[in-house]
Amino acid sequence: MPSPQLLLESDAGVLTLTLNRPDKLNAIDNELAEALLEALNAAAIDPSVRAIRLRGSGRAFCAGRDVGAAPTDKDLELVQAVSRAIVTHPRPVIAAVHGWTVGAGFEWMMNADIVYAAVDARFKLPEASLGVFVTGGLVATLPSAIGPMRAKALMLLGETFGAAQALDWGLVYRSVPADELNAVSLAAARRIADLKPEVATEFKRVLNQIGLDQFDRAIEEESRVQRMLGRDDVGR
């Protein structure tokens, strides 16, 4: 059965996937991650889908993992599986982000092929201060986008920054007024959907193959370190 935590809408070859836990700022729990993974996998074999748009409902794109419960191996596996599904998806994925885009939400944004950000978007990677490691292949995607020094600073310092810095550093493609984000991102997705599917697929595949050649290794190493840091004996 479809989950109420993920809204699906099809329009002229564009599948829009909306994270729908607005009361939790779309924080990720297992139900949301499983629903998103299922939708991405189904879209990968659906010839009617030629572009995907990922966004959030309410006041935020995604506030990261729901910290209402201690993280488990299943949480880690699902977050990593969604990241793999976005990066390896045969169709281009556009992320439209607004409000808080934090932690795993930021990581999923970085897995997308093109990112549009509302001017009110706020970004943060708090993992180091929480004693956990990043996920989503971020150790590959973030240095690829902004270089190792800036990537280390964002991960270790955990400072909040806005859409202007994200645009200046190349983390997003365009920054637009909040009330234009939906229309602008949908128009871009429709332009991609109008391309020959095999053309869009091959552009994405080859660019990722060359630019993110360490992505699989990044996922594996992140998962290993995440589990290691979660052990009770670490630091004793």
Image (tube, rainbow, N blue to C red):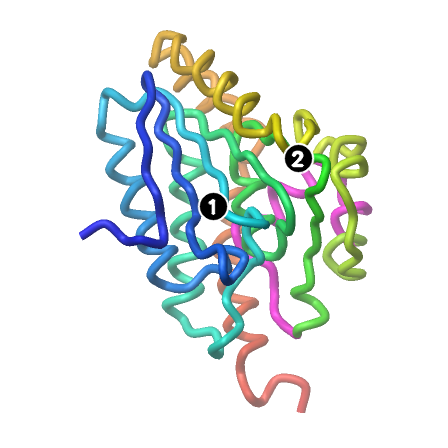
- Residue drawn 68% across the image and 25% down it: 174
| 136 part of magenta stretch | yes
| Coordinates of residue 35 in the picture (x, y in percent) | 31, 51
Q: Range of the magenta residues? A: 131-152
Asked which quadrant contains residue 155, the reply is: bottom right
> Does residue 49 appear to the left or right of 124 in the view shown?
left
Circle 1: element type: helix
Q: Residues within 10 Å of mark 1 (few under 14, many from 20)?
A: few
The alpha-carbon separation of the residues under discs 1 and 2 comes to: 30 Å
Q: Of callouts 1 and 2, which one flags the residue occurring earlier in the amino acid sequence?
A: 2
The residue labelled by disc 1 is 216
* Membership of 34 in magenta stretch: no
The image shows residue 121, relative to residue 224, as above or below, that is above
Nearest the viewer among 54 and 206 is 54
Identity, as a three-letter code, of the amino acid under mark 1 = Asp
Magenta part, dominant SS: helix
